[in-house]
Image: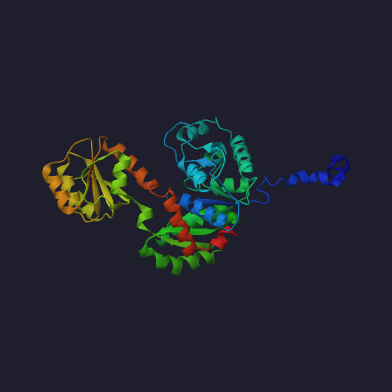
Amino acid sequence: MTDTDPEHEPADTEPETDTDPTASGGDTDTLLVSSLEESTGKTAITLALARLAAAEGDSVGYMKPKGTRLQSNVGKTLDEDPLLARELLELEAEMHDLEPVVYSPTFIEQAIRGREEPDELRERVQEAFETLAADHDRMFVEGGGRYDVGGIVELADADIAELLDARVLLVAPYEVPADIDDVLAAAETFGDRLAGVVFNNVPDAAYDQLETDVVPFLEGRGISVHGVLPSERELSGVTVAELADELGASMLVEDGRDSYVERFTVGAMGPDSALRHFRRTKDAAVITGGDRAEIHTAALEAPGIRCLILTGGHRPSGAILGQASETGVPILLVQTDTLTTVERAEDIVRSGRTRDAKTVDRIEQLLSDHAAVDSILG
């Protein structure tokens, strides 16, 4: 046992205590998955990449330093992303480590008043990371909402990447060339830590231009594009039936219950304006008062409207129900007012089906088919 006796160790070995692998991740490779905006599929991509790495034999861990998907304004952790990660990746980690900062509206108010100390928060994040990274080859760190969220307490995604010595994968949407301004701004923010970009949920109409013109432009600027994932309806919306269930709505007309809803429009204008507006809308639900028969009629005449959500508990007339049945447009009835219903419905579609095992499975396949996974994982 003399070879492990501290008295018999050479004196020059003592400084090696600085090589604690948890100090900055050590031998643990750390990838922070950030995004230009909310609802870009960041969670599903993070977990899918972790599972792809695990399939290659790596031990993987997960962390979301800032909990941003909260169901209430108080400081209780209700972010579903770390819960899903713990389940899908079979992690034993504690929630307070997986999500050390609960970035709630109350927390933000306290931070603005100077009641949250950035240095203490950074220390909390780093300690949690060290605990999580200790037993893993790779750590997958999920950013919070947009990449600039957290700047109030010096914990924006770029700050976290620096703190945890992480490479950054940026998840970005794309519809028109002007969207690339946002990619360039983010790339400048992350600097040398940016490992590359994955475009997600790219509509068919934009796909060719992105691959033909935009990708070469970005790579000419030194920004690697590791993948272009096409839009899939099942990943970009919720069915009317799912929406009714989440809203606690009564379904007065059930025809079309399996149609997908990707966006909402509020019927608060006159009938002529409403009809013009509705005809320019695609895969949408109209939210309006149950007593606005002229709006109901206009919505039922527009081909892109997938359902009517009537607020205030007001049942429509038999004529409206008959018209809806004929056109195959379901009608949902809720007791809440229009503003509350809009807020709840948007939250449902925004989070949608992007946070369940089936979605992560599909994103895993899309990454395998349309992205350079080996380059992303490094």
Query: Percent position (x, y) of residue 191?
Result: 58, 55
Q: Is residue 159 above or below residue 180?
A: above
Q: Along the horizontal axis of the image, is 289 left or right of 117?
A: left
Task: Report which quarter residue 7 is drawn in.
Answer: top right
Q: Along the horizontal axis of the image, is 281 left or right of 108?
A: left
| Residue at 44% from the left image edge and 38% from the top image edge | 70
- Work out whether residue 185 can be spotted: no
Q: Is residue 248 above or below residue 363?
A: above
Furthest-left residue in this view: 319
| Residue at 85% from the left image edge and 41% from the top image edge | 5
Query: Percent position (x, y) of residue 330?
Result: 22, 48
Give 369 or 305, whichever is nearer the viewer.
369
Furthest-front residue in this view: 1
Give 346 or 267, whichever is nearer the viewer.
346
Rendered-image quadrant of the C terminus: bottom right
Query: Percent position (x, y) of residue 373?
Result: 54, 61
| Residue at 53% from the left image edge and 51% from the top image edge | 33
Judging from the image, the colouring scheme is rainbow
- Work out whether residue 137 can be spotted: yes
Query: Percent position (x, y) of residue 136?
Result: 62, 49
Rendered-image quadrant of the N terminus: top right
